[in-house]
């Protein structure tokens, strides 16, 4: 491969793409709004994987990509890539309680706790398992951190804090300050406690460090959970897992003769050691319905004119949370309009305008990915079973949660990815008279909560692009207020729905930037790259060696 520096300079000097340069009549607000309205309608039943709502979703996306003029990019000339998953769901009622000092306290599933299991069994019966507080539940030798100190957790249920130790400390420590690391994610905590041999895990829910309220935990936790099929699944999952309300944790710790805030401060230091919560034990019993299902990624392809073996990916997840308990209005459908029918709409519209114009040098894939809400399963499966070589995949531009609230001055990306695409996004946005805002909420850990992360772990330069906060009508204060209200009330809830007041102006602007960025990467000779400090740089450098 040629030296990347002069090629990169060529990319940086590329002429900006104006909205008037976009083929097919440009990005259409009507199209974007129509796609969201259809995908988020009651008819699609909340777009849960392996449900009738999936069938409707797949059919719609295939139909629209066909109309857009791209070709099938799935397996053996089809539109889809099958994604086999194990689905597990609580079957019937849940009985659970804690016992402390001889007193038994029944727990209500959904209110006090949310319990589930991905263990390969059809019934969970945990009887009087001792509760042990394990702080943040992290073992990170490279950061000089080990919360376990050799503690024996066999047969015990770990009580663990969400996020990581720096979230509430006055000065940054071993975990990058308030910018959450992967060690702060609930997925990591489940994985690590399985490795530690615990029989169960209860994550203490706190709204600020979790970045969402209990309603989101409840909606997600009472839905089916998914995993890839594993012959040795018991090695990867504790028998029991779930969340507990903060007030319950505070009460248990107090009755064990301890103070919650004091124990949290202790957990924020590398000297922390696990501590039993007195004689507190947990009992839980419920049936688990397990089956294997096949859900699907939908992929359209536009072959590159000169280097068709090199690929740029646009992606968005199509799934939402299906049908759950009715809200106060009686609506039980989690429509997933903002999250993430907006992203799917953008991918379809990008396919249309690219197909209407001259083909870029590199091929483009337009992906609607499954089961993001179930742990990035569709993206993870694709990364493990790519339909275009990952070492020749130049970039992934993932799209999430565009705004329905009109025009924004800025566009944003999720997390601090330490990837050249962030600088490219900034430059392209500014060329269109807009600004780029780095993620203003790094402590929420969004970098680890979107499909681009699955590609990043495989070394592919990837970002997730979303709406900014600086509204033309009301500025940053208005944007923050609207976003906070959404996450407090509608995130993963039925009220995340399309309405006639939907204003797709800001979505149009964001998709115009995404078009310009994708066209630049697809036309250029340069390869986007991970920057110094990225945990993915070494993986990509190995791919670079393969590509040469």
Image: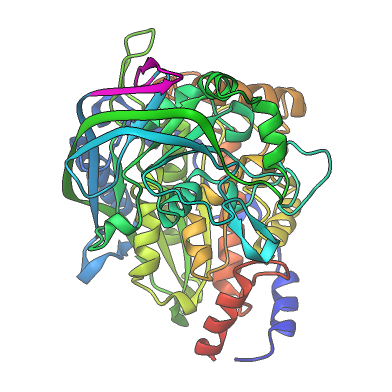
The quadrant holding residue 6 is bottom right
Q: Can residue 8 be seen by looking at this rendering?
A: yes
Task: Tell me if 225 is positioned left or right of 379 in this view.
Answer: left
The quadrant holding residue 520 is bottom right
Task: Tell me if 227 is positioned left or right of 250 in this view.
Answer: left
Q: Can residue 37 be seen by looking at this rendering?
A: no
Q: Is residue 30 above or below residue 139?
A: above
**Is 99 a magenta residue?**
yes
Tell me residue 17's x, y (percent): 65, 58
Residue at 51% from the left image edge and 56% from the top image edge:
452
Residue at 46% from the left image edge and 70% from the top image edge:
359
The quarter of the picture where the N terminus appears is bottom right
Q: Which residues are magenta?
A: 94-110
Count every numbered label the image shows and give the total: 0
Depth order, front residue of 156/379 = 156
Depth order, front residue of 506/379 = 379
Depth order, front residue of 543/129 = 129
**Is 331 a magenta residue?**
no
The quadrant holding residue 383 is bottom left
Tell me residue 7's x, y (percent): 69, 82
Magenta span main SS: strand
Colour option used: rainbow
As drawn, the residue found furthest toward the right would be 171
Residue at 41% from the left image edge and 41% from the top image edge:
156
The quarter of the picture where the C terminus appears is bottom right
Tell me residue 471's x, y (percent): 71, 30
Tell me residue 322's x, y (percent): 30, 31
Task: Tell me if 209 is positioned left or right of 52 in this view.
Answer: right
Residue at 66% from the left image edge and 25% from the top image edge:
259
């Amino acid at each position: 491969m040629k030296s990347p520096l002069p090629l990169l300079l060529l990319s940086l000097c590329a002429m900006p793409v104006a909205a008037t340069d976009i083929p097919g009549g440009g990005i259409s607000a009507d199209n974007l709004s129509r796609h969201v309205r259809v995908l988020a309608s009651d008819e699609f039943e909340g777009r849960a994987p392996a449900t009738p709502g999936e069938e409707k979703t797949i059919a719609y996306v295939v139909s629209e990509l066909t109309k857009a003029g791209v070709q099938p990019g799935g397996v053996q000339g089809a539109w889809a890539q099958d994604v086999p998953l194990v689905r597990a769901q609580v079957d019937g009622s849940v009985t659970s309680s804690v016992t402390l000092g001889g007193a038994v306290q029944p727990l209500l599933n959904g209110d006090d706790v949310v319990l589930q299991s991905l263990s390969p069994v059809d019934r969970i019966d945990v009887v009087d398992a001792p509760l042990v507080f394990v702080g943040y539940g992290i073992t990170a030798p490279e950061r000089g951190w080990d919360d376990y100190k050799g503690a024996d957790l066999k047969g015990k249920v770990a009580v663990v804090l969400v996020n990581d130790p720096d979230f509430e400390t006055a000065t940054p420590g071993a975990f990058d300050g308030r910018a959450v690391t992967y060690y702060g994610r609930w997925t990591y905590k489940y994985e690590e406690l399985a490795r530690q041999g615990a029989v169960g895990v209860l994550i203490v829910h706190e709204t600020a460090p979790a970045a969402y309220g209990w309603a989101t935990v409840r909606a997600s936790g009472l839905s089916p959970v998914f995993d890839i099929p594993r012959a040795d699944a018991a090695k990867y999952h504790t028998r029991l897992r779930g969340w507990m309300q903060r007030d319950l944790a505070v009460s248990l710790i107090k009755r064990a003769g301890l103070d919650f805030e004091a124990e949290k401060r202790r957990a924020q230091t590398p000297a922390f050691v696990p501590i039993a919560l007195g004689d507190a034990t947990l009992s839980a019993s419920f049936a688990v319905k397990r089956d294997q299902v096949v859900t699907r990624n939908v992929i359209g392809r536009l072959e590159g004119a000169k280097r068709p073996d090199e690929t740029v990916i646009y992606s968005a997840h199509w799934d939402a949370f299906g049908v759950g308990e009715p809200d106060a209005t009686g609506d039980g459908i989690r429509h997933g309009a903002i999250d993430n029918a907006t992203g799917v709409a953008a991918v379809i519209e990008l396919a249309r305008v690219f197909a209407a114009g001259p083909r870029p040098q590199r091929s483009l894939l337009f992906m609607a990915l499954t089961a993001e809400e179930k742990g990035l399963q569709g993206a993870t499966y694709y990364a493990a079973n790519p339909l275009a070589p990952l070492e020749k995949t130049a970039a992934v531009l993932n799209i999430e949660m565009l705004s329905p609230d009109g025009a924004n001055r800025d566009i944003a990306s999720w997390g601090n990815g330490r990837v050249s695409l962030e600088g490219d996004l900034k430059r392209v946005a500014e060329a269109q008279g807009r600004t780029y805002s780095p993620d203003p909420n790094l402590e929420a850990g969004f970098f680890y909560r979107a499909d681009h992360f699955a590609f990043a772990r495989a070394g592919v330069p990837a970002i997730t692009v979303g709406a900014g906060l600086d509204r033309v009508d009301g500025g940053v204060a208005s944007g923050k207020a609207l976003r906070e209200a959404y996450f407090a009330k509608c995130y993963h809830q039925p009220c995340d729905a399309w309405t006639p007041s939907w204003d797709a102006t800001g979505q149009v602007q964001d998709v115009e930037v995404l078009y310009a960025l994708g066209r630049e990467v697809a036309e250029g000779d340069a390869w986007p790259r991970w920057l110094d400090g990225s945990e993915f740089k070494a993986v990509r450098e190995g791919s670079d060696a393969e590509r040469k």
